[in-house]
Amino acid sequence: MILPELQQPPPFLMPISDVFSLHQGRSVLWTGAIERGEVRKGDEVEIVGLDGGGCGVVTDIDALGKRVNQAGAGMHVGLVMRGARVCDGRRGHVVAAPGSMGAHTYFTADIKLLSEEEGGRDILPGDRLLFHVHTAAVWGAVTLPQGLDAVPPQGKAAVSITLDKPLALEEGRRFAFRHHSRAAGSGTVTRLLAQ
């Protein structure tokens, strides 16, 4: 008899919404909604993205004012951490299973612009857009495919993006972007590239 392969649960991922210092800075509470996977008391986790990172151990999990031993996808929680300083994590970082996600500044993506009525405008080579990924907002520049002079409203294109700061990214990650302070479109990461 052949047993079916056990499917591994997805690795833990929680974008950080807010950070609070506890016990005069001896521990920290990171809040956010768990996007996937599970976390348990005693788990080691990693902070990924922006200009920093680090690892810590989950000492407590707060779910709607109650202490719980574990939490999973869809739950809004606070993680009390040991071995991590307040400066190691902030809004825009993610807390993830160690080694499950990296921070990147350069990637390719398929983008789609909104209609002109919704705020879409022509995207030109080198345009700087504000990219929203997880809870982060980071500026970046767009490189259009050779031979394409612009992406019009409601248009689609496969582009390269260079961010000003590294973000926690993976292939298939969806994001939104703003152009001239207005919502302009959305996209999906297709490939992570080394610079």
Image (cartoon, grey):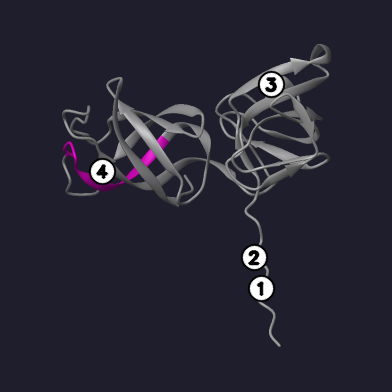
What are the residue bounds of the magenta stretch?
150-162
How far apart are labels 2 and 1 at the CA level?
Answer: 6 Å
Decide which of tag 2 and tag 3 comes sooner along the chain. Answer: 2
Give, as a three-letter code, the residue at label 1.
Glu
- Which residue is situated farthest in the bottom direction here? 1
Image disc number at residue 87: 3
How far apart are labels 3 and 1 at the CA level?
Answer: 41 Å
Give, as a three-letter code, the residue at label 3.
Cys
The residue identified by callout 4 is 144
Decide which of tag 3 and tag 1 comes sooner along the chain. Answer: 1
The residue identified by callout 1 is 5
Q: State which mark lies toward you, 3 or 1.
A: 1
Give, as a three-letter code, the residue at label 2.
Gln
Q: Residue at x 47, y 51 (%)?
A: 171
- Answer above or below: position of 8 versus 117: below
**Mark 2 and 1 residues: CB-CB less than 8 Å, in contact?**
yes
Secondary structure of residue under mark 2: loop
The residue identified by callout 2 is 7
Q: Is residue 72 magenta?
A: no
Give residue 26's position: percent from left, percent from top.
83, 19
Q: State which mark lies toward you, 4 or 1.
A: 1
Q: Residue at x 66, y 33 (%)?
A: 53
Q: Is residue 142 left or right of residue 134?
A: left
Q: Is residue 156 magenta?
A: yes
Decide which of tag 4 and tag 1 comes sooner along the chain. Answer: 1
- Answer above or below: position of 159 versus 9: above
Decide which of tag 2 and tag 4 comes sooner along the chain. Answer: 2
How far apart are labels 2 and 4 at the CA level?
Answer: 39 Å
Q: State which mark lies toward you, 3 or 4.
A: 3
Give, as a three-letter code, the residue at label 4.
Leu
- Answer above or below: position of 6 versus 115: below
